[in-house]
Amino acid sequence: MSDSLFYRTFALDRAKIDPAKREIELSFSSETPVQRFGQFEILDHSPGSVDLTRLNSGAAVLLNHDPDKQIGGVIPESARIDQDKVGRARVRFSKSALAQEIFTDIADGIRNAVSVGYTRGKVLAKELRDGVEYVTWSFVPHEISIVAVAADATVGVGRAAHFETTEQNQGRGIMSDAATETKPDKNVKGILALARTFNVPLADAERFINEGKSKEEFQGFILESRHKAQPVGQLMPDGEIGLSGRELESYSLVRAIRGFTENKRFEGLEWEASVASEKRYKRTAPTNGLIVPFDVLLHKRALNATTPSAGGYTIGTDVLAANFIDLLRNKALVTTLGARMLNGLTGDVTIPKLASDPTATWLAETAAISDSQPSFGQVLMTPHRLGSSVPLSKQLIVQSSLDVETLVRRLLATVLAQGFDLAAIAGTGAAGQPLGIINTADIGTVTYGAAATWDKVVESETTLATANADTGRLAWLVSPETRGKWRTIPRESGEADYIWGDDNRVAGYAAAVTAQLSSSDRTIFGNWEDLILGSWGDGLDLVVDPFTLAKSNQVQITVNMHGDVALARPASFVVSTDSGAQ
């Protein structure tokens, strides 16, 4: 955690510019609380809490924190902590064309902001204020940057704090050199406290804060959201840690992989998000790896730069990334058909269910009623690990002009979704797999025999109705081969009315096709709302291994998640016992 790089933005005072020496006196730190992931960070400025060694050794002055754009340096031994507990230093600009351009912009009032990059040291204190945690840290400033635009009022991962003009300088548009980052007012603290209490994504809280809305309006938003909430959800939304839109756009798996490959360490936004995920999910990131929050995966195989089919087609200026033709994959459909998602699970989960109803009997007028008790059962869900390992060419990571970031995210998300989908359909319940529909006991069955017929299709519907399960999201799921055959089998001999209709419905019910069923030669008809998918809200473990495949200039990426599958009522599904449907 101490190696993570953070930023804060402050203001420049043009009155303290010395054009002849190309020098500026500026502020670089203060004890102003800054929000990071629902906490407020305080940098302690007491003696011994700030290590100024790097700055006083002539640290770099950069443009926008870019190490390739050094425009000056900190004058040695000029960095200090003043009695007002503000860190200040004097910097000198170089004679390079870029440095002179930036210095002129500052002198002309075009650029008014400076940002410091620092690492946090030890936690010195923690306290709760109005339900919000404030954490005080020691810290080490590393570099000072001139930046064009300060960021939002609510500070998240890797973003600088908002700065504002002092009242005395607002008329002239001149920025004070005091550390004037936005302090959390009572309304902001109230909104953040509500977000923490009701587990509302931090992005929603930030949106209300940025729009200047009140705590009461945010409370109404929470109540309305709870009222509209449905049991059916998208994959893993409850695993979010609250990254803002800007942070999601900035987050880069490829940059994290490249950084670890080159420096054997993770830094910046990706590492800070992993640290926040550790707190959110209450676990530790894997060795040589990160926890990738689901915010990232939701926001948006062996590849190399020389072999066309293995990534080479993505290299060069002639490639239009938007027109990249992705690999055709098996469709993951169970959630589309109506399977319910339980997200953010912790530990083993038991879901109660009614096993049998009480009974009613007709009686004589004065006869006593016998007790009739309903019986209850439960559905047990336990986490199963789902993983995938992908080698990436180092040359591709460095050179590719294609949106490799999107490609890598899509690849990981698609592979995991397919694995989850296949387990829901045909998981064996052995070798770490969940138990899928096809292999669950007590489901309904129909045997097609030599060939599929309209009568057998109707038999599936009848079997479901006999079990009182013909309600809810009823739909068919079949293989491409089965659909092809059913499009040629008429309901009635000699009629042009086929089992699989032109409207993609079978017997009046929705029907879907997936190659996930090709290996099982089965058809499934049922109420998909009774299929439950559970995800344990602990993010994705992403491990970077730059050693195993080093001889082939590749990096091995391994990713893991945890989930399970359960049927609320096995009788809600009817499955064919043979391949006669094809």
Image (cartoon, rainbow, N blue to C red):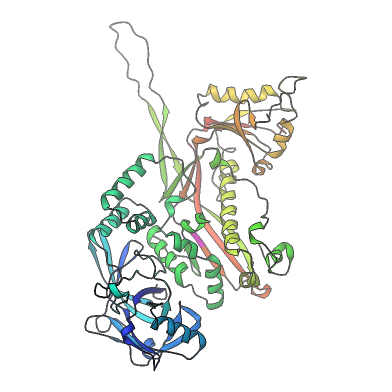
Query: Is residue 331 at least partly visible in the picture?
Result: yes
Q: Residue at x 53, y 78 (%)?
A: 263
Which residue is rendered at x = 27% and y = 67% of the image? Answer: 183
Task: Please give the count of numbered marks on the rendered protein.
Answer: 0
Q: Locate the C terminus by quadrant.
A: top right
Provide residue 181's location: percent of width, then percent of height.
30, 71
Q: Nearer the viewer, residue 213 or 369?
A: 213
Spot the residue most to the right.
494
Q: Residue 157: x and y, percent?
A: 40, 66
- At x 60%, y 63%, the residue is 403
Residue 258 versus residue 353 in the image, above or below: below
Return the residue nearer the eye: 496 or 442: 496
Image quadrant containing the N terminus: bottom left
Query: Position of 172 compared to 350: left or right?
Result: left
In front of the other: 259 or 463: 259
Q: In this picture, which residue range is highlighted in magenta? A: 536-541
Q: Is residue 454 above or below residue 123?
A: above
Residue 116 belongs to magenta span: no
Measured from the top left, where is residue 450 in percent x and y? 75, 28
Nearer to me, 289 or 314: 314
Q: Is residue 28 above or below residue 253?
A: below
Does any portion of residue 539 appear in the rendered image? no
Q: Position of residue 551 (x, y in %)?
A: 67, 75
Residue 537 highlighted magenta (yes or no) = yes
Left or right: 171 as drawn, with respect to 97? left
- Residue 43's image quarter? bottom left
Name the residue furthest front. Answer: 171
